[in-house]
Amino acid sequence: MGVMGVKWFGAEFIKKLETAIEIRLDICAVQVMNTAIDLMKTTPLTASKGRAIRRRKKIGTKVSYVDDGSVTQGGGFYAKVGGQAGIKGFKILYRSLPGNPPAVQTGHLKRSITWERAGRYTRRVGTNLPYGLYLELGTKKMLARPFLRPAMEKSKDFIEKQLKDVM
């Protein structure tokens, strides 16, 4: 009877597995990033009566806000010129409600959300804008309007499936 040889492919298998895990982690980071951006696009809005409106220069037509968020002419708040939200030629500034993702005002925060490799098996999703932290966690004067934690929570099943599929 002859001796049977066994060829070991363990190192090659481990390298392929590690590469597959890294690719899946990249996919998961992109999913969380896209989910955070989508949450900002779909957040419930309310008409703003805050400093952002009151600091605008007087521009002809007065705009007032009703409790239900609708807009009427003739009130005491002024809108920024440029868009069309309710009154032709005017853009109404909207804010998100506390607990909801931030409303898109200029789009800077939304465009700044990105991801990076922080290590071999670590991915970070976030923004480099300082006010992103204030929106995510809140301040003494402002309740949080999280967008990253809800994105991670919403993507949990997707991430779990991606990592199970590797095995």
Image: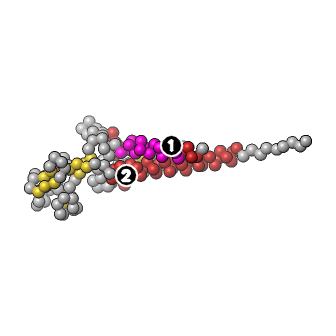
The C terminus lies in which quarter of the figure? top right
Residue 101, x across and y down, in percent: 32, 46
Q: Earlier in the sequence, mark 2 or mark 1?
A: 2
Outermost residue toward the right in this view: 1
Mark 2 is surrounded, within 10 Å at the Cα level, by few (under 14), some (14 to 19) or many (20 or more) other residues, namely some
Which residue corresponds to the image point at 37% horizontal and 52% vertical from the top-left? 38
Q: Nearer the viewer, residue 33 or 59?
A: 33
Outermost residue toward the top in this view: 140
Q: State the extent of the magenta-drawn residues as a range.
A: 147-162
Q: Secondary structure at mark 2?
A: helix
Res. 65 visible in picture: yes
Left or right: 153, with 63 as reference point: right
Residue 20, x across and y down, in percent: 59, 49
Label pair 2/1, CB-CB below 8 angstroms: no
Task: Answer above or below: position of 154 versus 84.
Answer: above
Residue 80, x across and y down, in percent: 19, 57
Residue ID for mark 1: 160
Residue 4, quarter of picture: top right
Residue 10, x across and y down, in percent: 70, 44
Residue 73, quarter of picture: bottom left
Mark 1 is surrounded, within 10 Å at the Cα level, by few (under 14), some (14 to 19) or many (20 or more) other residues, namely few
Amino acid carrying label 1: it is Glu
- Which mark is on residue 129? none
Amino acid carrying label 2: it is Asp
Which residue corresponds to the image point at 77% horizontal and 45% vertical from the top-left? 7
Q: Nearer the viewer, residue 115 or 167?
A: 167
Residue ID for mark 2: 38
Dominant SS of magenta comes to: helix
Real-space Cα separation, disc 2 to disc 1, in angstroms:
20 Å
